[in-house]
Image: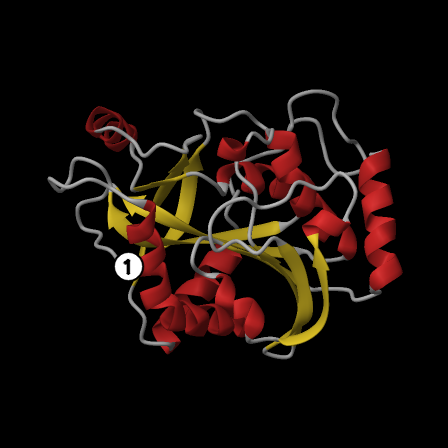
């Protein structure tokens, strides 16, 4: 609690900007931060105790500005378990954005498609998630000033925001799939046997982020929605190895369409 308040005080010493909407930009999707009317930028490394991004293409900074006449704060890059951070550290920037004033959160990520109806370049609205394979950021003493000890997850991805996303996609002539997302620790890609297991459990897409952020966000009162960009077929669906470069290439190729969709979503919510 003390560290969060200290971090917020530092941010407020730089800017008094109050965002309505927070957006987390996933792998290969950070270019949107360069397209908004920027009011302030704060590097994660400037904020004492805040974890910094290590993934390729993740710049690691908060970008404050206006998008579609809404005030927004963007995480241009996120942090991951595979970098050695804990679930609590990953929750830290999410909680900070809530304390800044944002009450709606758009999460984006690059994911592998488990559902065989998905193909690289598709967008998947996250209907629900599976959190069993990662540690909850809420383990330990509850931060009562943020939220309740036992938060309900039956509407983790807000129904109203999901409806708005579907409308935004339709207005943009962008096909939108929907499904269940599962987060694993990484950094290694999954084995064919693991993908088969995840499919049996009901997962449609897999990645190395987002679920921990959603849990922390719901706990502290955010209305949450999420979109996965399917960048590759999950392991075992095709007889070929997976690479991080493939993920980045697909994300970069689809970035203009993604930016269009996010702009429409911000306008709609």
Residue 133 drawn at (x, y percent): 43, 25
Q: Which residue is at the front of the view, 265 or 193?
A: 193
Tell me the crowding category of disc 1: few under 14, some 14 to 19, or many 20 or more residues within 10 angstroms, Cα based: some
Residue 238 sits in quarter: top left
The answer to whether any part of residue 178 appears in the image is no
- Where residue 3 sits: x, y (%)? 82, 37
Q: Quadrant of the C terminus?
A: bottom right
- Res. 102 image quadrant: bottom right
In percent of width and height, residue 157 lies at 50, 47
Which residue is at the far left? 239
Residue 147 shows in the view: yes
The residue at the point 58 percent across, 46 percent down is 53
Relative to residue 191, is residue 91 depicted above or below? Answer: below
Q: Which residue is mark 1?
A: 122
Instruction: Name the quadrant of the N terminus.
Output: top right
Question: Under tag 1, what secondary structure?
Answer: loop
Residue at screen point 84% across, 62% down: 14
């Amino acid at each position: 609690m003390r560290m969060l308040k200290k971090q917020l005080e530092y941010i407020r010493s730089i800017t008094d900007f109050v965002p309505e909407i927070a957006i987390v930009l996933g792998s290969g999707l950070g270019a949107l931060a360069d397209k908004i009317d920027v009011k302030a930028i704060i590097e994660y490394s400037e904020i004492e105790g805040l974890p910094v991004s290590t993934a390729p293409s993740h710049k690691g900074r908060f970008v404050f500005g206006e998008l579609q006449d809404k005030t927004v704060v963007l995480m241009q890059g996120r942090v991951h378990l595979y970098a050695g951070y804990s679930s609590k550290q990953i929750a830290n920037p999410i909680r900070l954005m809530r304390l800044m004033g944002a009450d709606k959160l758009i999460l984006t990520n690059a994911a592998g498609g488990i559902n065989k109806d998905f193909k690289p370049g598709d967008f998947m609205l996250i209907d629900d998630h599976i959190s069993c394979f990662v540690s909850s950021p809420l383990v330990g003493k509850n931060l009562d000033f943020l939220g309740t000890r036992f938060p309900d997850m039956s509407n983790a991805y807000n129904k109203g925001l999901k409806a708005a996303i579907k409308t935004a996609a339709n207005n943009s002539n962008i096909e939108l799939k929907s499904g269940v997302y599962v987060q694993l620790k990484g950094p290694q890609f999954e084995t064919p046997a693991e993908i088969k297991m995840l499919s049996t459990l009901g997962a449609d897409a897999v990645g190395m982020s987002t679920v921990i952020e959603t849990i922390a966000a719901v706990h502290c009162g955010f209305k949450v929605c999420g979109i996965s960009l399917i960048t590759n077929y999950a392991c075992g669906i095709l007889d070929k190895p997976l690479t991080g470069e493939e993920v980045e290439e697909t994300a970069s190729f689809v970035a203009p369409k993604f930016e269009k969709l996010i702009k429409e979503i911000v306008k709609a919510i």
